[in-house]
Image: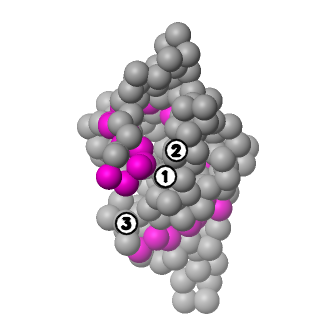
Amino acid sequence: MIINLIKLGIKILLKTNCERIIIKRLELLIKNNIFLGEVEHIILEGEKIIYNGLHVDYAKLNGFNLKIDFKRESKFLKIKDFCAEIILYLSQENLRNIINNKDSRYSNKIREFAVQNNNIDKISLQNKLIIFHFSKDNNKYKKFFNIIYKNNHIKLIEINTNKSLLIPFDKNIIFNSLELCESFIEVEIISKVRIDN
């Protein structure tokens, strides 16, 4: 009974905090099946996610040692920060939407570096490269980039000029892997998860 209430509370939090999410799987592991304010392990899988302007086709979260309090005054859950292993699939369309987002400092830097502040019409992935398609003065252009991660930074390297852009990330995010697949980028990170509740 209590597990179902916690699951319902987590689903409500996700639906409230995300602009869009399809929850495919939510599992909770509680020690000895007795809830004493802690969930040992949470597995959450979602699709078609939009959160704070970040578009993600698929995400899987493995979280550990969640401390959960019931807020008596509002009869709702309060989830404290916890650590999680997260897998993200970013499609070509997800990447285009993220980089064209003018409200993001990182996106603006990438757009300025890669396409001189033009909007990206399309992104494609080919032979482990990212290709930015964009228009300027009624002409169509393509630029080819390699992407690597090192020391918790992502580096975008233009193939023709070898110029690079270093993109630093929050110290609470640790990259395990970044792989360019045929139609998406798979990113594995370890991160502290904060839920506004």
| Kind of element beneath mark 1 | helix
Q: Residue at x 26, y 37 (%)?
A: 171
Q: Residue at left 62%, top 73%?
A: 121
**Amino acid beneath label 3:** Ser
Give the left or right position of residue 187, taking residue 128 as reference: left
Label 2, secondary structure: give it.
helix
Question: What residue is shown with label 3?
Answer: 104
Label 2 near label 1: C-beta < 8 Å? yes
Which residue is at 70% across, 43% downward? 24
Q: Is residue 188 left or right of residue 191?
A: right
> Which residue corresponds to mark 2?
10
Residue found at the far top of this picture: 32
| 141 to the left or right of 191 | right
- Of residues 101 and 181, the one nearer the viewer is 101
Q: CA distance from mark 1 to mark 2?
A: 5 Å
Residue 87 visible in rendering: no
Identify residue for label 1.
Answer: 13
Q: Which residues are magenta?
A: 73-102
The three-letter amino acid code for the residue at tag 2 is Ile
109, above or below 41, in the image? below
Spot occupied by residue 194 in the image (x, y as percentages of width and height): 35, 44
Q: Position of residue 170 (x, y in %)?
A: 29, 43
Q: Residue furthest left?
A: 171
User: First in sequence: mark 3 or mark 1?
Assistant: 1
The mark nearer the N terminus, 3 or 2, is 2
Q: Residue at x 61, y 89 (%)?
A: 138
Residue type, label 1: Leu
Q: Which image quarter is the N terminus in?
A: top right
